[in-house]
Amino acid sequence: MKQLVEKHPLAIRWFHWVNFPVLSLMIWSGLWIYWANDIYRIGWGQTTLFKFFPQSFYDTFGMTHKLAQGMNWHFMLMWLFFANGLLYVLYTLFSGEWRYLLPNRHSLREAWQVTLHDLGLRKTAPPVQKYNGAQRIAYTAVILMGVGSLLTGLAIYKPVQFGWLTQGLGGYEAARVQHFVLTLGYVLFFVVHVAQVVRAGWNNFRSMVAGFEVEDVPTTGAASPVLAQRDPDAKA
């Protein structure tokens, strides 16, 4: 028989779906700003192996000469990003959801098992949990990255008013590098996250939309659909 198993509370789903477009638009508007002084590259001396980003990239996506527009959008979205992140952290603290999100002493081992399984190097699937070790580490890292982006962003935005913060981060240029690297981290997280969602299938995606998964359970009597509460740390 089919059983509906609760997985994600409504609040978690709202925070997730608000954060995704806000962060995406912040990255997009950030590229408008970066175009005005796109100095970062991979290389040494006069040798450049890779440049962020070639002029053809800006021309293709219409990102040139939009510095003022990009700054307006970026700083407006910053407040939404901050408010959504703050509410999310407060919710996890007061609801007890943090117990399922923070890494524990088994997380590193579980994350390694998940990685090997996803790469096809380990046949045995990791234990079924609400959040496995890799997810716990990744989601906690994203929260810390959000704090880092906020602090480095303020240091860049108001280097005089927040002089103590800018200096604490190593100066204006250091804060800008850190802000840029954190942005690359978000992009990497997006790519891996979307790949994992596609790999997990529709049932997993539905849990973040509707809040439940559909599972097959052995029929022991009169069959009727039920809504069950999964133990987040239960193993199968």
Image: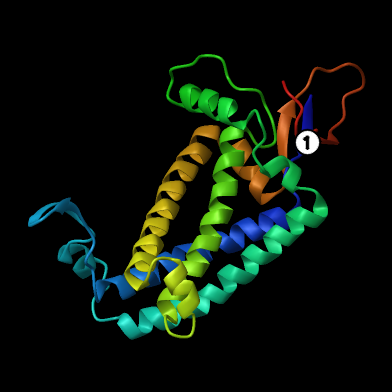
Does residue 103 appear left or right of residue 50 in this picture? Answer: right
Q: Quadrant of the C terminus?
A: top right
Compared to 21, does 6 lie above or below?
A: above
Quadrant assignment, res 159: bottom left
In the image, taking residue 230 as reference, residue 220 lies left or right, namely right
Left-right relation of 174 to 225: left
Viewer-nearest residue: 154 or 85? 154
Q: Nearer the viewer, residue 176 or 78?
A: 176
**Where does the image place residue 228, in percent across and percent down from the top left?**
84, 35
The residue positioned 62% from the left and 40% from the top of the image is 136
Measuring from the top left, give residue 16's x and y in whole percent: 62, 56
From the viewer's side, name the closer residue of 94 and 232.
94
Q: Residue sitting at 67 percent across and 54 percent down?
A: 13
Residue 215 sits above or below residue 137 on the image: above
Circle 1 is placed at which residue position?
4
Colour basis? rainbow
x, y percent for residue 224: 87, 30
Count of marks overlaid on the render: 1
Q: Amino acid at mark 1?
A: Leu
Q: Residues within 10 Å of mark 1 (few under 14, many from 20)?
A: some
Residue at image coords 22%, 61%: 53
**Camera-nearest residue between 207 and 235:** 235
Residue 179 occupies quadrant: bottom left
Q: Secondary structure at mark 1?
A: strand
